[in-house]
Structure formats: structure tokens, C-alpha cells
Image (cartoon, rainbow, N blue to C red):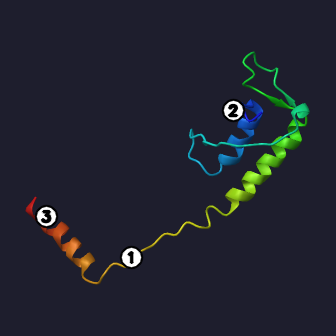
Amino acid sequence: NKRLVESSQLRRAIEEVYANYLPKHAHPFLYLSLRLPPNTLDVNVHPTKREVQFLHQEEVIGAVQQALRNRLLGSNESRTFLSQALLPGKEDTASSANMSAARKN
């Protein structure tokens, strides 16, 4: 019924996938919309019906993990780092300034 719900098992599975991409102690923010037949959900896990469990939990979690892995797999390939060559003479100027400062002390 398009309600916002939680699944602790699914959350842990998602954090496991993102662990390879995020710094330690960081958590992913993810909004995931799943369309499943109502008879495959157990909404009576929590009194407020906010927590759900899936009838075929391993299959659902495995499919979500695989989809995330596929999506994130190429994310590191798109990073581009530009480098700039040090111009001749610039390094010598910095070195001589450091040596001059050292002589004064």
C-alpha cells in the first residue's frame, strides 16, 4: 500500500554491500521502493506495522544485494583524478626559500 516500512534484515544486507564503498562507521542513505504481492509480506512484526518481513526473505534480500552490487560496480571507474606537472624552476624556488629560512635560524 505504498507505506514507508523498515526491514532490519534488508538494512543489514544493504549496509554489507555499501561497506566496500563507504568509510568505516558511515551508513548509506537509501530509499528503496519494492513492489511485492501483499501475501508475501508479514506486517505484524511490530505493533505500529512499521517493520516488515518477507515470505521469501533470502530471495528478496539476495536480489536487492545483487542489484546494488551491479549498480555500484562501475561507480569507482567513473572517478577521474587530474594531475598537474610541476613547472621547471618552481621546485627550485621552493627549495631555495626553505634553505634561506633555515640559514636565518
Q: Which secondary structure, mark 2?
A: loop
Task: Tell which circle, 1 or 3, labels the residue nearer the N-terminal end.
Answer: 1
Q: Residue at x 79, y 28 (%)?
A: 52
Query: Which residue is at the far left?
Result: 104
79 on left or right of 48 = left
Do labels 1 and 3 touch, CB within 8 Å? no
Q: Which secondary structure, mark 3?
A: helix
The N terminus, quarter of image: top right
Looking at the rendering, which quadrant does residue 54 occupy? Answer: top right
For disc 3, the marked residue is: 101
101 on left or right of 66 = left
For disc 1, the marked residue is: 84
**Local crowd size for mark 1, using a 10 Å CA cut-off: few (<14), some (14–19), many (≥20):** few
For disc 2, the marked residue is: 4
Q: Which secondary structure, mark 1?
A: loop
Looking at the rendering, which quadrant does residue 33 occupy? Answer: top right
The C terminus, quarter of image: bottom left
Foreground residue, 1 or 16? 1
Q: Residue at x 48, y 69 (%)?
A: 81
Looking at the rendering, which quadrant does residue 43 occupy? Answer: top right
Foreground residue, 34 or 97? 34
The kind of residue tagged 3 is Ala
Task: Tell which circle, 2 or 1, labels the residue nearer the N-terminal end.
Answer: 2
